[in-house]
Amino acid sequence: MKLSPIFLSLAACAILAADPLGIERIVVTDSVDDGDSMIADTNQSSANQTFTGKSIATLSTQANMNPYSVIAYSPSVNFTPVDQAGSNEPSYHDPIRIRGKSQSGPGGVYMIDGMPISSNPGGGKQLVDMENVSSIDLLKGYLPADKNLGFSSLIGKVDLNLLTAKSKAGAEVSQSFGSDNFQRTFVRFDSGKVGDIAVFGSFSHLSNDKTKGEGDLKRLNGTLGLTYTPTNTFKAKVTAIRNSDDHHNYYNLSFNEANNLGANFNKDFATTQPTASNDVNYYDWNKQSFLTTALLGEFEYKPTTSDTITVKPYYKKDEGDYWFSKFDTAAAKQRVMNWRMEHDLYGATAAYDHEFSEALKTKIGYWYHKQLPPGPPSDQIKYKVVNGALVFDGYAVLANNDYHTLQAPFAQISGTIDRFTYVAGAQYQTFKLGSLKSHTNGNQTSAANPDYDAAIASTAIDPWASVEAKTFNTFIPSLYLGYTISPSTMAYLDYSRTYGFDVNLFPTYISSRSSFVAQNVTLQQLWDKLDLELSDNIDLGVKTTLGGLTLNPSLYVSFVKNKQANIYDPAYGVNYPANVGDALGYGAEFSAYGPISENLELLLGLSYNRYQFTQNFQSGASSTVETDGKQLPDAPKYMAKAALSYHLGDWTLTPSARYTSSRWGDVANTQKIDAFTLIDFDVAYRMAQFMGSHNALFRLTATNLTNEKYIATINAADNFLAATGTASTYNTGAPFGLYGSINLKF
């Protein structure tokens, strides 16, 4: 079923939204901590938003494990998971776009308590249970100096503020169940404050069959948190998280298959193991399994009422396997690949705040961060299929990679003078890409041992595909200006520079090594030409309150330089990813949230987004791909999402829907994917007392009521051109689902 924009305009007051709602009363206030607040603004007049605990309970899906399901209700945020559990596919990138942009390189979008602990590829994308999050800061426009962190910040940041151990003892228990054998159990216990210490521990278990084909998803999470407050001037917080994620992948459709969803919507991998050689179409050869451990600390000391010293150390270790089938170009045969990953990241931020007056507040600090690849990959094993069994066939990638290191001093001044509010900040960032020693030579059949250390020891370094460390030094400024027009109306103008880096050059060189060697081109020659992608972003907006309803129209523009594109270089006679692109993003957003009447409440997000290259690219010795002015892949121009909640006593009824306009699957705009609309409906009933609890919520959610057949995610890198042979793939979305849950607080 496809709904026209005209219908949506007429129906917006009745149904717009994206994911199922946990149906709680939506009331907007000025306080982030107010339990009735749905959205509180990170800055009173900024386009950035804080989704409070109320919004998390209201907007998170029944899986309660993916923060993107909450922020998906903000304008210009494009996140549509492949199933109703909210899982991310595939393993190697975050399928989220903000204002048309996708995240670059091995950097994650979300942070935890201001610490850039997420990364790609690998596990840990659903590292936190949403019940353990007090609020979520969405920074999609203005990025202050102390939040512009991580391997990449191009599209903004999603900062999860953890719910610390509570001062009173208590417990929370929830149980969910539903379609495709969905089950989730969550339990949290709080000790309450005992002396100077308070502790909480939580456990969750989720299992779900795939919505199509054979296979399942299993997630197990344990979290332990401790706070220590011996005095009013010092407090410490430590959180430990252990998360396991095991799930089978969904089949990726080709464009021709995606163009005929009626016949291919349920297409997936074969359910029985093949007996023929060279047949890789089997569901259990397309899966991933990761175990992630994270430690986060926060230590705050206030020697005076005007001074604060904060130190935030963090550490994450991620290990596992990502299995997938592919066509091996070098061998001209089908292969099953095992991308083995074992990597960690660690770092810390330290900051000193001093308040001279309301008009002048200062902050100086330092950030240090190290992370080990993959990104680029270092350990990919090939398997051929012989009589239905996997047989080791050497390495597709075998390399010894050093750490990437980022560090930056930063400074910021802020204050309020009469009706003006300002924040000015800057980083001076040193970004070092680690050296890379490749042991991959051709098909690497000489590496006869699947053990990584043994393979490294038994093979020589390939000088053609090995490089030294490379360093970028970058000035990263930011500025925010706000003006209070009246007690109910504010205007703002902000600017910030964001950055990122794609790591596609090394795997591209490896896959076509013979072509580069034939042209006498080493990886180091191309590596020396790499540059950091930079985006200069400007927002202009107004925020006003009418009754209980907050309205926020805004305009934005982004000027992107050094964007990576897979181009043909006539000097070398080869194709490779190079930082030669300029791109332009611009658009308009409108959000509205709050009560329309005593029993009726609204959350609405509308957006128009353009994101495009501003030039064409040479794709061959005598061929050019027309990309100038073309919308980049998986970036819808129009989106609308919202919800209406009607309260009747202890009951809440919430119809919701999301409209996503047509998208392109390639940068040349030759592969068009149709628009779609998802309609959901929730019913919730609250009881003050049930089974000894002081708060019980019963919930029934129907998702994709019309059983819409649609493409959820397009797997297409911004920088690859169809003319160079890199094909986009497409993941279908979840069909109709029905879910029930009970949540008890003691």
Image (cartoon, rainbow, N blue to C red):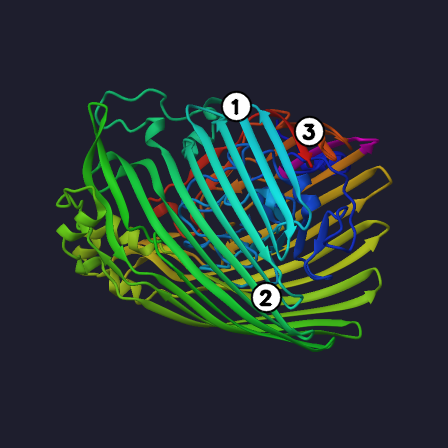
Q: Is residue 638 visible?
A: no
Q: Position of residue 729 (x, y in %)?
A: 42, 38
Q: Is residue 563 left or right of residue 687?
A: left
Q: Which residues are magenta?
A: 647-659
Return the residue found at the far front: 195
- Percent x, y for residue 17? 67, 38
Labels 3 and 1 touching (C-beta < 8 A): no
**Residue denoted by label 1:** 180
Q: Identify the residue position indicated by label 3 in the image.
A: 699
Q: Residues within 10 Å of mark 2 (few under 14, many from 20)?
A: some
Task: Quarter of the image for the N terminus: give it.
Answer: top right
Question: Residue at the location (52% across, 23% down)?
Answer: 180
| Distance of label 3 from label 1 (alpha carbons) | 18 Å
Q: Secondary structure at mark 3?
A: strand
Q: Which marked residue is nearer to the observer: mark 1 or mark 2?
A: 2
Q: Residue at x 13, y 50 (%)?
A: 458
The answer for how far apart the CA atoms under marks 1 and 2 are is 46 Å
Residue projecting furthest to the bottom: 356
Amino acid carrying mark 3 in the image: Arg
Residue 462 in the image: state x and y as whole percent: 17, 57
